[in-house]
């Protein structure tokens, strides 16, 4: 970055009283008590974990910390500044600190003036030779008093990275992109020529390219590279896009939709496998056909109506495609989409690449500086029209929820350690209320039907008892009375049923059934050993 641009940028930052962040740090001086803090930030800015254009440390500018009005981490104006006579001494002190960072960072020591006072700008350029770390000599220096190691900048904090951040930092400097690497076992033979041709048709490739042989087509699309052992090895992104079963070569390269089974505490799942761009299309279709639902709502006293969805299709399309596009495919975990009665949950087992944070995903809609984990896939998805413009999917998902009157999307986790990204889409409240009313009405209707059936059963039972009481002698009636409830409810009875109900012998049970036959209450049907006694039709409708 040109020095004049750095000075202009720094001047604007101070003039606008910008808050300290992951590329701005204010220090009143470079005295011994803050040397350790400055050195940490130098190292952190060189590592550039958040992928910023430059990191700026302002010396001679005190940060505000007003507990009464809550103002914090902004420059105190007018600035305290540095006496012109002390500028060289301060710069030498900073150069001494810089010598404790290895490899040597690229930096600029510049001067500027504001509020008629001088201040120093220590500008740290993003390095390519890292990861950068501070020396053991600095740790032993009592004036510096800090732990040696690699440092990164997260928000306003310069600190040693946690395990997840350390891994990402190492990948950053190794320029490692899993999808661009050669697959361990897949070759040209494992790529489906028909999928390759279909991709070219959908992306409007010229006829001569679509007519290429499989080998030449794979070379034109940069899908393969020659192997040191002969033949052609396929790259990981080629496997993901064009293999029949990508998960054979890249474990867990698929999406699992796990649904709550209505009315139970169980879940059911459905796997979506195959080329990932076809996964994206099939998931959309599945949501549209089996999950998405709507009501048309007419408001009293108003003309027209509006349609409300449980979840809007565009939101699901954007978030599910984002899961596929931004997955870290070197990790052995599938993409999970969970469908509950009141929310959807999308989970990827990796974080967005810096400078995007979970906080950004919750608060912002535009991500012009978004970095892509899978650049090759991004370009192919864009050509397939699965994404419309870079960094705009979340904006469209949020707008779809807003247009549907749905609650805001919620991203998590809210810490720097958990290594996953989750977004929850809550059900539209108006839809949920109508659905609840509809289910309540259905339950009420069923209850009325059950009550009517019960009333009819009781009436039948009472009617049958009255008939038998009048037709039979008291002694006979008392013997068969216990069989009436069973007959009314089941409309038939067997000898075994009679034995179980009366707790009498088989012979006695036969006699009881004969009483009912003689009274015209039941009629037998079937062979002697398997006879069934059916309730007479005249009692069925009463």
Image: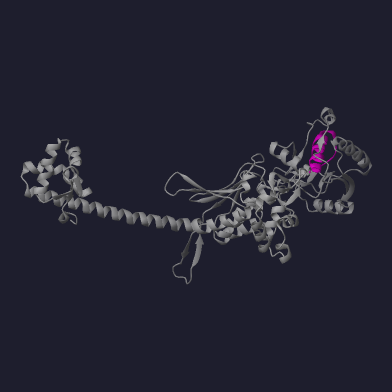
Residue 311 visible at all? no
Residue 505 located left or right of residue 47: left
Q: Residue at x 16, y 38 (%)?
A: 502
Q: Which secondary structure is most common in the magenta stretch?
A: helix
Residue 174 located left or right of residue 293: right
Percent of width and height locating residue 145: 81, 30
**For the image shown, how many numbered marks are present on the structure?**
0
Q: In the displayed orientation, state which residue is furthest to the bottom.
A: 303
Part of the protein shown in magenta? 26-47
Q: In the displayed orientation, state which residue is furthest to the left.
A: 473
Res 96 quadrant in image: top right
Q: Nearer the viewer, residue 419 or 251?
A: 251
Percent of width and height locating residue 64: 76, 44
Q: Nearer the viewer, residue 236 or 407?
A: 236
Percent of width and height locating residue 542: 18, 56
Residue 198 visible at all? yes
Asked if residue 39 is among those painted magenta in the image, a careful observer would answer: yes
Q: Nearer the viewer, residue 489 or 424?
A: 489
Percent of width and height locating residue 54: 81, 48
Q: Nearer the viewer, residue 468 or 255?
A: 255
* Coloring applied to the structure: one colour
Asked if residue 303 is among those painted magenta in the image, a careful observer would answer: no
């Amino acid at each position: 970055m040109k020095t004049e641009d750095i000075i202009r940028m720094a001047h604007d930052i101070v003039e606008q009283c910008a808050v300290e962040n992951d590329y701005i740090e204010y220090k009143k001086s470079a005295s011994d008590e803050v040397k350790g803090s400055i050195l940490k930030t130098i190292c952190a800015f060189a590592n550039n974990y958040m992928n910023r254009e430059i990191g700026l440390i302002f010396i001679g500018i005190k940060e505000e910390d007003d507990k009464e009005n809550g103002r914090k981490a902004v420059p105190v104006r007018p600035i305290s500044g540095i006496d012109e006579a002390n500028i060289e001494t301060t710069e030498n002190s900073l150069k001494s600190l810089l010598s404790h960072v290895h490899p040597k960072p690229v930096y600029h020591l510049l001067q500027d003036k504001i509020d008629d006072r001088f201040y120093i700008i220590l500008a740290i350029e993003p390095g390519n030779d890292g990861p950068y770390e501070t020396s053991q000599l600095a740790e032993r220096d009592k004036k510096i008093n800090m732990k040696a190691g690699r440092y990164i900048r997260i928000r306003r904090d310069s600190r040693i990275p946690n395990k997840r951040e350390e891994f990402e930092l190492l990948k950053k400097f190794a320029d490692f992109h899993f999808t661009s690497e050669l697959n361990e076992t897949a070759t040209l033979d494992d790529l489906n020529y028909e999928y390759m041709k279909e991709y070219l048709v959908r992306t409007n490739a010229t006829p001569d390219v679509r007519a290429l042989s499989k080998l030449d087509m794979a070379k034109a699309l940069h899908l393969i590279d020659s192997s040191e052992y002969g033949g052609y090895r396929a790259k990981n992104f080629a496997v993901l896009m064009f293999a029949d079963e990508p998960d054979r070569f890249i474990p867990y390269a698929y999406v699992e939709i796990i649904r709550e089974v209505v009315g139970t505490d169980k879940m059911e799942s459905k796997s979506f496998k195959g080329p990932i761009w076809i996964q994206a299309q099939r998931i959309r279709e599945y949501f549209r056909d089996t999950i998405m639902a709507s009501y048309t709502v007419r408001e009293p006293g108003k003309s027209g109506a509006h349609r409300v969805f449980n979840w809007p299709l565009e939101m699901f399309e954007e978030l599910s495609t984002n899961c596929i596009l931004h997955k870290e495919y070197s990790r052995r975990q599938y993409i999970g989409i969970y469908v509950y009665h009141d929310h959807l949950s999308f989970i990827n087992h990796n974080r967005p690449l810096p400078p995007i944070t979970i906080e950004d995903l919750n608060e912002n809609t535009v991500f012009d500086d978004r970095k892509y984990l899978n650049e090759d896939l991004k370009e192919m998805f864009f050509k397939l029209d699965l994404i419309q413009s870079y960094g705009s999917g979340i904006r469209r998902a949020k707008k779809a929820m807003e247009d549907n009157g749905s609650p805001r999307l919620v991203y998590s986790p809210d810490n720097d350690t958990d290594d996953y990204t989750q977004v929850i889409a809550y059900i539209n409240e108006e839809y949920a209320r109508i659905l609840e009313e509809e289910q309540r009405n259905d339950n009420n209707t069923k209850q009325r039907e059950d009550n009517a059936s019960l009333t009819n059963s009781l009436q039948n039972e009472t009617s049958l008892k009255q008939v038998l009481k009048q037709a039979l002698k008291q002694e006979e009636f008392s013997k068969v009375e216990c069989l009436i409830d069973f007959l009314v409810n089941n409309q038939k009875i067997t000898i075994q049923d009679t034995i179980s109900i009366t707790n009498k012998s088989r012979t006695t049970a036969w006699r009881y059934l004969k009483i009912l036959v003689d009274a015209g209450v039941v009629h037998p049907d079937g062979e002697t050993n398997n006879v069934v006694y059916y309730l007479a039709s005249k009692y069925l409708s009463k």
